[in-house]
Image: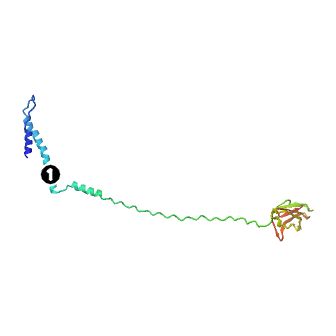
Amino acid sequence: MDEQQDERNDLERPVDPPSGVRRFSGERHLTRRVIAPACLLLVSVPVVALLFLNLRSVSGDSSPASANVGRTSTATSSPTPTPSTPTTPTPSAAPSTPPPSTTPTPTAPPTPAGPRVTGVSATSGPAAGGTVLTVTGTDLGAITQVLFGALNGANLQHESDSHFTVTVPAGAAGAVPLQFKTGADDAASAITQYVYR
């Protein structure tokens, strides 16, 4: 308190003006009425604030603001639960549809083994006969007889397995069956008749 009184006396003590400056008559009145109260206010405010802080520290009261700050920090620190996303089951793949069954294409029957006549040099001739025919094909060596209707061809000569010659017998005018025999069986042939003229 002595220090505050000294500061107050210093503030109230008039200040001597510089040399050549004339002191006005209301100077002391201005110092006491304006400057002194202002200085006293500046000194009093820190003292009051210090006392207020001491009282609060002794009482241990917490202000609502500090309580709110504590609650805010606690609420902030606590983790927010994240809702779990349900797992959508993946649909199983649909069973594959078997391809439509296709009808197999019938294959031609295999060519029977044995002699096969594919060509004859002439399919017609005079009724008097005597025409020499050249017969071509495969495996012709097994052919032993050529029939013109009921008549047997003459001079059957095998030159190879692919061709032979035969002489046409005389016959009546008209078409007759042409057969190539391998003993009791007939050889396959593309030519089935001979025409007498």
Q: Give x and y (percent) for residue 180.
A: 84, 66
Q: Amino acid at mark 1?
A: Phe
| Towards the viewer: 31 or 19 | 19
Front residue of 47/86: it is 47
Q: In the rendered image, which residue does mark 1 sit on?
A: 52
> Which quadrant of the figure has residue 195?
bottom right
**Given the current orientation, which residue lies at the most extreme top position?**
20
Identify the residue shown where x is 13% and y is 49%.
Answer: 48
On screen, 116 above or below 69?
A: below
Instruction: State the image coordinates of residue 121 (x, y, percent, origin top left).
Output: 85, 59
> Which element carries disc 1, helix, strand or loop?
helix
Q: Quadrant of residue 133?
A: bottom right
Q: Quadrant of residue 171?
A: bottom right
Q: Nearer the viewer, residue 48 or 138?
A: 138
Seen in the picture, residue 40 relative to 169 is either above or below; the reply is above
- The figure's colour scheme reads rainbow
46 on left or right of 145:
left
Number of numbered callouts drawn: 1
Mark 1, other Cα within 10 Å: few <14 / some 14–19 / many ≥20: few
Q: Residue at x 22, y 56 (%)?
A: 67
**Which one is in front, 192 or 109?**
109
Q: Return the x and y of residue 138 as percentages of the image width and height.
A: 80, 63
Q: Among all residues in the image, which is located at the extreme right?
A: 128
Q: Is residue 103 left or right of residue 18?
A: right
Q: Quadrant of the C terminus?
A: bottom right
Q: What is the x, y in percent for residue 89?
A: 45, 64
28 vs 61: above or below:
above
